[in-house]
Image: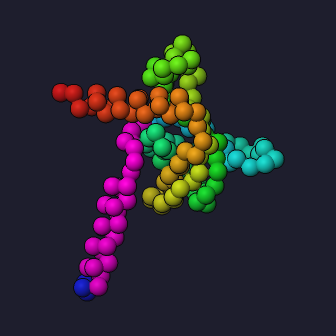
Amino acid sequence: MSDKDNADMGASSKETQDEENKRQYLRLPRPYRVQARELVFPIAKDPLLDVSCNDISKGGLCVEAQLPLPVGTRLHVNVHIPLLNKFSSGFFKVYENDAEQYFQAIADVAWVKTCGSVYLMGLRFVNADEEQCRSLGKLVEEAFRSLEKP
């Protein structure tokens, strides 16, 4: 292996580390059910996209899909998060039935990576209810706190 190859590998490793350090929010690995549909007008009658959640944060989520979407694709996402309303300080707190608790947002595909025979896609929330975002942030923080307890 040449010095140039070693330098290139070092750069790639550094870029990966820098990318991980750029994360603004804690990411909670959970297989939440996700319903996603491309947001186009007129309203698409396309079926829901087949994606599953790998991890979620206050700023977005990573999903696994059989087919990739182009970066920049805008989606309407519904993420089924049992007990999300438990972390709400407002109106939604009265609805603590976990059967129909969805975090709803408009998200953009921020990145796409191949992972074996599937694709990982980072979805960045671009528009969501502020109270739901706060609740999601509290849920993630509480999950990490409970993991740290002996």
Q: Position of residue 60 (x, y in %)?
A: 49, 44
Q: Is residue 15 left or right of residue 37?
A: left
> Within the magenta stretch, is there residue 88?
no
Q: Position of residue 31 (x, y in %)?
A: 45, 37
Magenta span of residues: 4-30
Q: Quadrant of the N terminus?
A: bottom left
Decide: is 57 above or below 8: above
Q: Quadrant of the C terminus?
A: top left
Q: Is residue 14 left or right of residue 94?
A: left
> Within the magenta stretch, is there residue 12?
yes
**Residue 9, quarter of picture:** bottom left
Q: Position of residue 115 (x, y in %)?
A: 45, 58
Question: Please, which colouring scheme is shown?
Answer: rainbow
Per the picture, the main secondary structure of the magenta-coloured stretch is: helix
For the question of whether residue 36 can be seen, the reply is no
Which of the two residues, 100 or 52, is positioned nearer the viewer here? 100
For the question of whether residue 70 can be seen, the reply is yes
Q: Is residue 64 left or right of residue 13?
A: right
